[in-house]
Image: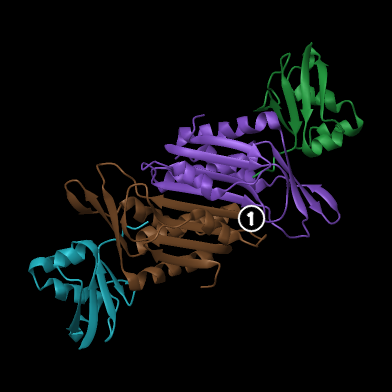
Chain colours: A cyan, B green, C brown, D purple
Amino acid sequence: MAVVKILYFASLREAVGCDQETLDVPDEAGTVGALRALLCARGGDWSALEGGRAVRAAVNQVLARPETVIAAGDEVAFFPPVTGG
Amino acid sequence: MAVVKILYFASLREAVGCDQETLDVPDEAGTVGALRALLCARGGDWSALEGGRAVRAAVNQVLARPETVIAAGDEVAFFPPVTGG
Amino acid sequence: MEEAFRVSVSEADFDVGAELDALAAGRSDIGAVASFVGRVRGGEGLIAMSLEHYPAMTEKALAGIVSQARVRWPLMGVRVIHRVGRLLPGAQIVMVAVASGHRGAAFEACEFIMDFLKTRAPFWKKEELPGGARWVDARESDDAAAARWDTDQP
Amino acid sequence: MEEAFRVSVSEADFDVGAELDALAAGRSDIGAVASFVGRVRGGEGLIAMSLEHYPAMTEKALAGIVSQARVRWPLMGVRVIHRVGRLLPGAQIVMVAVASGHRGAAFEACEFIMDFLKTRAPFWKKEELPGGARWVDARESDDAAAARWDTDQP
């Protein structure tokens, strides 16, 4: 088990209705992709995290891939493709 | 015959020792290339206009080619490749 | 990141002229300064554009992009400023300025930083329109612009 | 050439910030402003750089280059300023600023204008060095930079 902080931004934050949460992530959800699937499985508004949707992630403020490993104390963020500049 | 004004700039101006002149150009020297050859044939410092040297030309303030035709009243300029910017 | 290479995020507007002057101040080794300013474009009844960001990540991401540019080109200074908050049409959003010895490096690095900023830095735009607010969609052309640097080594 | 598209040649220095502000003043249709400033680089004991030009041709040549850029890209404003006379290391020589709806057009047109200015506008640089004065040679890389636009239609 790994306690991580999870942040949501922009349209994804509005869709799931949550800015941030602290979650005890089971070992089998120890990657960005697995954590995303776990959150999506909550159903309802959380389907905004479904596989077909364009969702990006960062771990400890660095862009991450689905296979990026998550460790206790990490800050994981989910957000839509960026649109700055 | 066509009376034209001829200008020289930068290193070419210094080489030929002349800023500008007015010249009655014979019909057979009625293009930029032929005029250049005529001027070069003066010899001495004017060999700066020899065929092998990088010399550019403008007619009436527009970049010209050797085959560009010269008419009475034209302003013809010879100068080295530009180096502004 | 030393003084000549700076990134920042702020709600306040910025003074491009002052930033460009600061980049080159007291130096005679800089032959070229390329810069870019992005502004809020009006149209379609746009009332305002709000920029959200991920504060803990933003400056880190921008500094990382600048570091990548420095690996690719010999740069003498870089300034990146990105605004957040609510901006009106015509307002400045972002500026990137790059100083180098020659213009090729300055232009390329400035474009590179903008392309990467558009696709890697955590900012999101939301438009306020007469009918309500709408998040701006990411554009495929921005991904394509960033992707060209993958193979196009200078 | 109307107000938003201006070229000039002068001995006086220019204020880049003021010029950029003037380009975008009162407009909300401009999404992107790309600009370039060229400066006198020191080194090799350079004392000064003198710029000669062909007065009757210079602004005509610059305006022609801007017109060509407008044929290739949808531009909303262009400002070109080139200095002449004796300039010290670190001094500004030239600025090109281009306003457009999007960054791709602004960047490309700004580079295009600089590339053509370097190879088509009648300016010549002479360096003052400790051992005497020397005309600067044209660089093949500048010809190559200009030539890429022959085939590279946007």
Please name the residue shown 15% across and 76% down the image.
A38
Single out the residue that lies furthest toward the right.
B44
Chain of the residue that carries numbered disc 1 in the rendered image: C
Single out the residue that lies furthest toward the left.
A44
Q: Residue D41: x and y, percent?
A: 68, 56
In the rendered view, tell whether residue D82 sits above or below residue D90: above
Residue wearing tag 1: C31
In the rendered view, tell whether residue C23 sits above or below residue D93: below
In the rendered view, tell whether residue C71 sits above or below residue B28: below
Q: Is residue C12 left or right of residue C54?
A: right
Q: Is residue D128 left or right of residue A69?
A: right
The answer to which of A69 and D48 lies nearer the viewer is D48
In the rendered view, tell whether residue C60 sits above or below residue C88: below
Using a 10 Å C-alpha cutoff, classify the residue at mark 1 as few (fewer than 14 neighbours), some (14 to 19) or many (20 or more): many
- The answer to whether residue C23 of the structure is visible from this angle is yes
Please name the residue shown 60% across and 41% down the image.
D81
Please name the residue shown 52% across and 50% down the image.
D17
Rendering quarter of residue D63: top right
- The answer to whether residue C71 of the structure is visible from this angle is no
Q: Residue C151: x and y, percent?
A: 45, 59
Query: Total of numbered circles in the picture?
Result: 1
The answer to which of D81 and D115 lies nearer the viewer is D81
Rendering quarter of residue A17: bottom left
Single out the residue that lies furthest toward the bottom.
A1
Q: Is residue C73 left or right of residue C146?
A: right
Amino acid type at circle 1 is Gly
Please name the residue shown 37% across and 56% down the image.
A85
Q: Residue C37: x and y, percent?
A: 44, 52
Q: Residue A81: x and y, percent?
A: 28, 61
Q: Secondary structure at mark 1?
A: loop
